[in-house]
Image: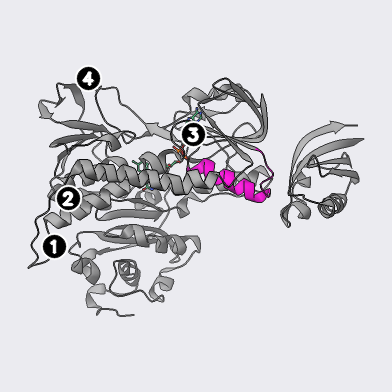
Amino acid sequence: MSEYDLAIIGKGAAAFSAAIKISELTSNQIKIAMIGYGPIGGTCVNVGCVPSKYLIEASKNFEMAKKPLYDGIKADASIDFDKFMESLNGFVSDERKEKYEKVIKNFDNIDLYDGKAKFLDKNTVAVNNDRITAFNFLIATGSKTFIPDIKGLTDYYTSENIWNIRKIPEKLVILGSGEVAIELAYAFSNFGSEVHIFNRSDRILKGFDEDITDNLRKIMENHGIKFHTGVNINEIKSKTLFYGNNSVNFDEIIVATGRIPNIDDLDLNKAGIKFNNRGIIVDKYFKTSNENIYAAGDCVDQELKLETLAGKEGAVSAENIFGSEKTVNIKNVPWVVFCDPNVASVGYTEKELKSMNIKYNIRKIDLKNVVKANILKSNDGIAKVISDENGTIIGVQVLAPNAAEFIIEGVYLIQNKLTYNDIINSSHVFPTVAESIKIAGQSFIRDISKMSCCME
Amino acid sequence: MAKNIELKVYGMTCDDCVAHVTEGLKSAIGVKDVYVSLKDGKATVKADDSVNPKELEKLDVFTKTHYKAQVRSVKDE
Ligand SMILES: Cc1cc2nc3c(=O)[nH]c(=O)nc-3n(C[C@H](O)[C@H](O)[C@H](O)COP(=O)(O)OP(=O)(O)OC[C@H]3O[C@@H](n4cnc5c(N)ncnc54)[C@H](O)[C@@H]3O)c2cc1C
C-alpha cells in the first residue's frame, strides 16, 4: 500500500496541468501518484491535436504544391506517404519527449504508475497489483471514440490508430461530422483520397451556426468531398457501405462519430462519484459529488472537449483543492476546426441566444470584403460578430483562413466585456484576415460597401 | 466545547516558516492553541466550536504567502 497526498488518474493535459500547478503551490512538497496507461501525455500529443495538425498542414502543403494558386506558377508535386507518416510519428515522439517525458523528470514529488486505476473505496484505487491511497483525487481520464452499433463495422480506423496508416486510401469513408471527422476529411482529400462523409443527422459541426457550416460544406464539396447526411447506414460488407437503396465501396473507413468519457473502468460508485453517459458530474469548482475528489478535462460532463480547456480545468482544480473558488467560463473558451478555411468560435452562437430568448444584434460580413482573404484566394468565408443590446460583444464566429490564429481577439473582447466601438477604435494590421473582425465591427455603425480600404 | 483540527501544511522549510504559520493560525478568532511540526508538515490547532475548520485554509498565511494548508481531520475534544 502506497500513501499519497494526491492521486491523479490520467497522464494527459488535465493531469499534467494539475500536477504542475499543485506542485508549484506547495513548493513541490505535495506527494503525488500519477496513474495512467498508454504513452505519457495522453490524447493531445500522441493521437489528437499534435498529429492531426501536422497531418493537416502537410496535406495543405501538398495540395498547394499540386495546385499553385497564382498565375504563372507551375509545379509538379509527388508524395511518399509512408515516409511522410514516419516523419509525423517522429515529430509526435519528439514533442512527447520535450513536453512531457523531460518535464516530469523535474518533479521528484510525482511517482508515475503505469496501468488502469479502479476505485476500491473513497480513498483507495487499485493499479495492477498496487494499492494506492490518497487524501485527494483528481480524475482526468479523458475520452475515447464512440463506436456506433452498425452491422459489419469491424475493421476500421479511429483517431487513436489512424496514425499507423501507411498508404493513402483511394476511397475513404468517414463516419461522423464533428471536428475530428471534418479535419481528417479535409486532410485526406488534400492527399488525393475520394472522401465520403456519412452522418445520421443532416448537420455538420453542430456547435456552430448553420450559416457558417452551410458555407463550409459548400467549400468542402467544391473541394471534392462528398457528404451523405441525414442517412442511416444499413450494413457494411466486403468494404462496401450500404445505406438506403445505395452503396459506396471504399478502401478504408474511419469512425469519428463523437467522443465518450473514459470512465467505465473506474468503478466510480465505490467512491460515491456521480456521473452520466456524458461524463463525471462536477460543480462549478470541478468538485465531484465526493468532496475530496475533483475531475477535469474530457472525462467531465461538459459541452466542449479541448486540450486548452482540459489544461485550464486541471490547474483550477489544483487551486480549489486548497480552498480556492476558481471557475472556468466556458463561454470565454475559443474552439477551432482546423480545416481550411478554419472555423473558429468563441462566446454564444446565434442559435444558443435564440434558444435562450436573449435579444442580440449581429453583423456578418463576407470575406470578399477582406483584402488579405482575396490575396490568399480564400474568400468564401464569413465573419460574424454578435453583441448584446448595449453593444457588448458576446459572440464571434469566423470561417476564414488562419482564423485559429486570430480568434483570440474574440476572447479578449468577450472576456473584457468590450463593445463594437472598442473593435472600431483598435488599429488592426493591414492586410490581415483578422481585419474581418474589425470590418464586422464597423458594420455595426456604417454600410461597409461605402467604406474605403483601412477606413477608421 | 473545543475541537482539535489537524492540517497538512506545505511550503515550510525552516523554523522561521514554522513561526510564520503558527502566527498566521493564531491570528484566527477562536483559535486557542497551535502546534506546527516542520518535520511532518503538519499543524495541530485547538479551536472553539465556532471555528469552521475549512476557513483556516483561507487565512492570509495560506492565501497571501507561499504556504498552503489542507484540513485533514477534525476531532471533538
Ligand atoms: C483527433 C483529435 C484532434 C484534436 N485536436 C484538438 C485541437 O486541435 N485543439 C484542442 O484544443 N483539442 C483538440 N483535441 C481534443 C484534445 O485532444 C482533448 O480535449 C484533450 O487531450 C483531453 O485531455 P484530458 O487530459 O482530458 O484527457 P487525455 O489526454 O485523453 O488523457 C487521459 C488519460 O487518462 C488515462 N486513463 C484513462 N482511463 C484510465 C483509467 N481507468 N486508469 C488510469 N488511467 C486512465 C489515459 O491513459 C490518458 O493518459 C483533439 C482530439 C482528437 C481526438
Amino acid type, label 3: Thr
- In percent of width and height, residue A263 lies at 48, 28
Which class describes the residues within 10 Å of circle 4: few (<14), some (14-19), or many (20+)? Answer: some
Mark positioned earlier in the residue sequence (3 or 2): 3
Q: CA distance from mark 4 to mark 2?
A: 31 Å
Q: Residue at x 57, y 41 (%)?
A: A286
Which-is-in-front pick, marks 3 and 2?
3
Task: Output the chain of dot 1.
Answer: A
Local secondary structure at mark 1: loop
* Residue identified by numbered label 4: A152
* Residue identified by numbered label 2: A218
- Res. A69 mark: 1
Prevailing secondary structure class for the magenta stretch in the rendered image: helix
Which class describes the residues within 10 Å of circle 3: few (<14), some (14-19), or many (20+)? Answer: many
Q: CA distance from mark 3 to mark 1?
A: 44 Å
Tell me whether marks 3 and 1 sit on the same chain.
yes
- Left or right: where A44 falls relative to A296: left
Amino acid type, label 1: Leu
Amino acid type, label 2: Lys
Is label 3 within 8 A of ligand 1 (CB to nearest ligand atom)?
yes
Per the rendered image, the range of residues in magenta is: A13-31
Local secondary structure at mark 4: loop
* Residue identified by numbered label 3: A141
- Left or right: where A5 falls relative to A178: right
Say which quarter of the image contains residue A422. Answer: bottom left
Local secondary structure at mark 2: helix
Q: Residue at x 19, y 22 (%)?
A: A234
Amino acid type, label 4: Gly
Task: Output the chain of dot 4.
Answer: A
Say which quarter of the image contains residue A243. Answer: top left
User: Taking the image as four quarters, which one is ligand 1 found in?
Assistant: top left
Which class describes the residues within 10 Å of circle 2: few (<14), some (14-19), or many (20+)? Answer: some
